[in-house]
Each structure stands twice: as C-alpha cells, then as structure tokens.
Image: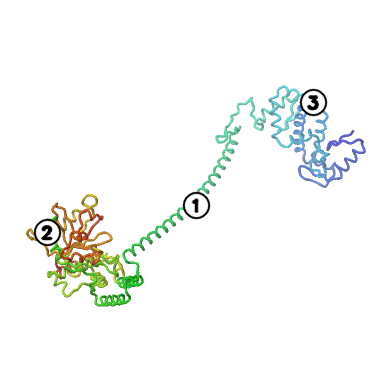
C-alpha cells in the first residue's frame, strides 16, 4: 500500500499513485496560500513558495513541529513517529493543496492532520502548548528527547533562535518571550495589573490602559444612549403632562361655563325674556290647563299692556290697610306682647305671573315706596310719583346708573335690566332711592352674632331704629319710620315692625312678597286671630342665613347732597 505524501490518500500500486498525483494534484489549478498566485503547475508553485514565502513557510513549519510533538505525546509515541515525519515533510505540499477545490471528503487528512492544521492557525495555540509543558514536568523530558531525535537542534518559534536541546529552548521561550505567553516568567518579578472594572489581569500597564479605555468608551456610549432615552422619556412625560393640563383646563372651563349659565338662569340674565314674556307664557299655561278662561287671558293681557305703557303698577297684587289692622289687633289682643312698634302705612305687593321667582326685590321696593308716598316728609322728592310697574323700576335703575350711581353694580349686570329677569338687591334699591333724593344707608350683618347661626344684633338694631323716637309708654307705637328693606341670599323681604314680648324676646313683623293676597287679606278682618299673624312673625331662631343686609331710610337728600353722593360713586376707588 502506498500513501500520498500530499493528501494522505492510500493506493495499492505505483501506477495508481502516479495517476492520483496527475489527476488530483497536477491537473487541477494550484493557488498559493500566501499571495493567491495561480496558473502554474505543482512544481512551480512549490518553488514559488520556497523562494517568495520562505519566512512564512518556516514559521508554519515551526508551528507544525510543535503541534506534531503535542500529537505524538498524547498518542502512542512509537506508532506516530513515522506519521509526524510525514506531516513535517509534507508541510509545503499541504499548504499548496489547502485551497484545492475538488478535494472530496474521502481525501481529507486523518484526525492527526486536522489537529495539525488547528494548532498551526495562530500563535495562541503555541502558548497553550508551552503552558501545558510547565504543568507536566515528567512529560517535558520526553518532549526533549523527541526534539533531539526528530528536530535537532530546536528552533525558537518566535525569534528563530536555535538551541542545543529542548530544555534550553523552553527556558529561552519562558525568559525571552514571557510577555507572549499567558503567564509571566517565574524567574522575573514582573508586576501584574488588575482591571478595576472587570478584574482582568494584564502584564503591561499600557495594555491595561487601553483595556480600561475600552470600558470607558462602552460606558460613555451606554450613558449617551441612556441620556437620549432619558431625554425622550422627559419629552414624552412633558407631552403627557401638557395633554393632561389641557384636558383639565378644558374640563374646568366647561364646568365654569355650566355654572355661569346656571347662575345666569338663576338671576334672570340668560336672555330668556323679561316681565312681559313671562307674564304671557304663564297665562297661556293657565289657559291650556283650563284654570283660566280665554276671555280672562285677553283681559289681563290688555291690562298688562296698558300698565307697561304708562309705567304704573296695575295694583292687582296690592293689599292695603294691613298696618291699621295690626294696630287694632295689638290694642285689643296680644296679651303676651309687652310693646310693639309699627312703621307708617305700608301696602303689601306680592309676585305675579310676570315676576314669579325673581321679582321679590322689585316688590319690596314697591312696598317701601308705598310707605314713603304716604309720608309727607318725602312729598317733595317724590312729588307726582306713583307706584311704578316692574319694567318701569328696571328703567329707573338704568337711569340711575347713567347718572353715575353704582358703576360696579351696573357692570355686573351688563348695564341692562329691561327685558331681563335679573334680580336686584340692597345695592340696586339703595341706588334707586338715592337717585330719587331719598337718604338711606346699607347696614351689613356679615356674620352671625348668636348661637346656632342666629343674628340677635340684627334684631337689636331694628329695635333701636323704631324706638329712637320719644313716644312715651304706649303698648302700640305707630312710628313715622318707613319700613326696612331686608336682604339675604336668594330672597328679600320688608320689615314693618317689631314686637317686644313679655319675656324680653324680640320678634320682627315682616311682609313677604311670596305671600299671596288672599293670605294677607285675612289680617284685615275685625276678629283677626293670632294664628293669622304667624306668617308675619319672625323670631331670632327663624333668621339663620349666613349674612343679612338692610336698607334703612333716614330722610331726604338735598340737591347738593345728591350731587355729592353721585360724585362719590364716580370717584375711582
């Protein structure tokens, strides 16, 4: 049996070997494994490698020697000696055939040849070999003998130095080329450097520095990515916060608009019409429900149009003579009352179809004005005046605003009352009376002064208001004082007197515009009972609103005083 020195394939005869060499290794294209030269035959390629790549070929041979020794020591020495020699002798041939394109799997070298190729790939494998030799002291002698018998003298694979024996070569490699091995020389105290970031041991400070620089570059790159990601996260969080704020503002604006519209409807500022429109609508509802005859509807409509045209109240909601009836009652009955003070004559006005739900302020002004018209002290400033209807009162307040009274209140009501259901309060009544030269002032009871949210000081103030005149000691005192306009949140009423009971408690007598005429007319009967006065009497425990305001009339303003009040209102605060 013959074996091919190039590829290791075995044949039975010499002619077969020649044919094998001609077909496999001669006819096919040969490529230089170092410079990729092609187009030459096998002998020319061997000559080219020996001349042009002598140094590379020698280095490969050195690696092959080391690898062959490693293979032989791991296997049976006697059986592999011939194979090792064959591998060394065929190093050039195997290098030329390494790029052979038509080599079949059956023609591949044996396992030992594969090991040879793996060990000849790089310098690291040689380091591993030398390192393993340090650990196997007994084996080194065997290797030395192999070096002497097979490769004598040994050559340094790193610098090409030739030594007499393998032991000297080993010492040479360990001392001269320790920096190329995995472990430093034991004969030299070379310092070791630990990487502070990963613990890697380096034998050279500059290598350690380059290694740490790589760590820092990776860290900076990671930090850069983190900063970019953090910036994106912050931007996203900012966008989400802006979106949330926008939705919150939108929801707050929607709720605020809803509350504003609710307040507009509550205070008659929703442009849904005024006194006239509401009167007609409510009368039509009564007709549709069968509680008013169509003829009655047309008659009331005609009376309303006439009243609006002349600006005077039609008197259909008025009840007169109640103060006189009260005087008679207290003279003949009310044994539990020690003293009582009454205003001058006052007519009661209640709400109608046209102002139900919002006209209490206007009706209380009508009550107050009815008392002033019956008092001669105010005849000069109210000369020729009658009780105006509600649209006329709205017009009079607008005229007072135009004169410069209460510009802030005018602004709050958009300088317009006519054609609306806008509420009026103590400030509007004060403005209107002042424009008519009626001297008055507003007293504010902004917090409770008694237990359970009561206002005893309000009662005391009203008592002092009525009892300031020298009237002697009669049980019933008919004063010359006009009634008092009393305002609280959502409603207003008119105080027409005050009782001092035998137990020293105080009780106000109040006209409520929400009380219909049929109830008030019960007070006009000769045999009025105490139960009929229940709707008038208000004790301290009955008035528990948070705040109260009163408008009290004090007399008549001169023309100069009116101008002074007007200038005071026009002067910026």
Q: Earlier in the sequence, mark 3 or mark 1?
A: 3
Residue under pointer 2: 467
- For residue 464, what is the image quadrant? bottom left
Tell me the residue at 27%/69% (across/down).
352
Q: Position of residue 112 (x, y in %)?
A: 78, 33
Q: Image check: 228 left or right of 321?
A: right
Taking 29 as reference, is 174 left or right? Answer: left
State the residue in front, 98 or 190: 98
Residue that carries the numbered disc 1 in the rendered image: 236
| Badge number at residue 77 | 3
Query: Helix or strand or loop: what does disc 3 sit on?
Result: helix
Q: Are marks 3 and 1 in contact (CB under 8 Å)?
A: no
* Within-10-Å neighbours for mark 3: few <14, some 14–19, many 20+: some
Q: Nearer the viewer, residue 490 or 337?
A: 337
- Local secondary structure at mark 1: helix
**Is residue 566 at least partly visible in the picture?**
no
CA gap between label 2 and label 1 equals 74 Å
């Amino acid at each position: 049996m013959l074996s091919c020195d190039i590829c290791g394939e075995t044949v039975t005869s010499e002619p077969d070997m020649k044919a094998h060499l001609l077909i496999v290794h001669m006819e096919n294209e040969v490529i230089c494994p170092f410079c990729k030269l092609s187009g030459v035959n096998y002998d020319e390629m061997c000559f080219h490698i020996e001349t042009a790549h002598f140094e590379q070929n020698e280095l490969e041979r050195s690696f092959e020697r080391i690898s062959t020794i490693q293979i032989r020591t791991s296997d049976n020495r006697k059986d592999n000696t011939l194979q090792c020699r064959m591998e060394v002798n065929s190093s050039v041939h195997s290098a030329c055939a390494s790029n052979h394109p038509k080599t079949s799997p059956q023609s591949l070298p044996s396992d030992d040849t594969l090991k040879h190729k793996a060990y000849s790939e790089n310098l690291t494998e040689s380091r591993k070999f030398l390192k393993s030799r340090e650990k196997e002291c007994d084996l080194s002698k065997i290797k030395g003998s192999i070096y002497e018998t097979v490769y004598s003298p040994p050559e340094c694979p790193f610098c090409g130095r030739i030594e007499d024996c393998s032991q000297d070569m080993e010492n040479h490699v360990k001392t001269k080329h320790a920096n190329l091995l995995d472990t430093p020389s034991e004969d030299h105290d070379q310092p070791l450097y630990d990487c502070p970031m990963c613990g890697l041991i380096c034998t050279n400070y500059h290598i350690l520095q380059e290694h740490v620089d790589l760590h820092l570059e990776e860290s900076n790159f990671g930090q850069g990515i983190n900063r970019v990601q953090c910036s994106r996260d912050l931007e996203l969080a900012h966008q989400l916060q802006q979106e949330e704020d926008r939705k919150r503002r939108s929801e707050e604006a929607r709720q605020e608009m809803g509350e504003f519209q609710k307040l507009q409807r509550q205070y008659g500022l929703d442009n849904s019409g005024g006194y006239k429109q509401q009167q007609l609508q409510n009368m039509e509802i009564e007709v549709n429900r069968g509680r008013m005859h169509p003829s009655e509807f047309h008659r009331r409509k005609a009376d309303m149009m006439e009243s609006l045209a002349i600006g005077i109240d039609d008197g259909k909601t008025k009840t007169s003579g109640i103060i006189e009836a009260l005087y008679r009652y207290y003279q003949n009955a009310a044994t539990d009352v020690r003293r009582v003070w009454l205003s001058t004559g006052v007519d009661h006005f209640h709400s109608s179809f046209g102002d139900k739900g919002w006209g209490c302020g206007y009706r209380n002004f009508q009550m107050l004005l009815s008392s002033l018209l019956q008092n001669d002290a105010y005849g000069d400033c109210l000369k020729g005046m009658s009780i105006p209807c509600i649209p006329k009162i709205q017009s009079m307040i607008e005229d007072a605003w135009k004169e410069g009274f209460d510009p802030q209140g005018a602004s709050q009501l958009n300088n317009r009352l006519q054609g609306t259901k806008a509420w009026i309060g103590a400030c509007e009544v004060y403005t209107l009376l002042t424009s008519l030269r009626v001297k008055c002032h507003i007293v504010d009871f902004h917090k409770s002064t008694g237990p359970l949210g009561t206002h005893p000081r309000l009662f005391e103030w009203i008592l002092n208001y009525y009892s300031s005149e020298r009237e002697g000691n009669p049980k019933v005192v008919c004063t010359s004082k006009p009634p008092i306009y009393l305002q609280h949140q959502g409603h207003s009423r008119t105080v027409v007197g005050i009782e001092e009971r035998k137990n020293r408690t105080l009780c106000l007598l109040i006209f409520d515009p929400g009380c219909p005429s049929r109830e008030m007319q019960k007070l006009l009967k000769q045999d009025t009972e105490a139960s009929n006065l229940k709707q008038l009497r208000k004790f301290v425990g009955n008035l528990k609103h948070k705040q109260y305001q009163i408008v009290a009339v004090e007399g008549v303003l001169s023309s100069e005083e009116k101008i002074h009040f007007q200038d005071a209102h026009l002067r910026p605060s």
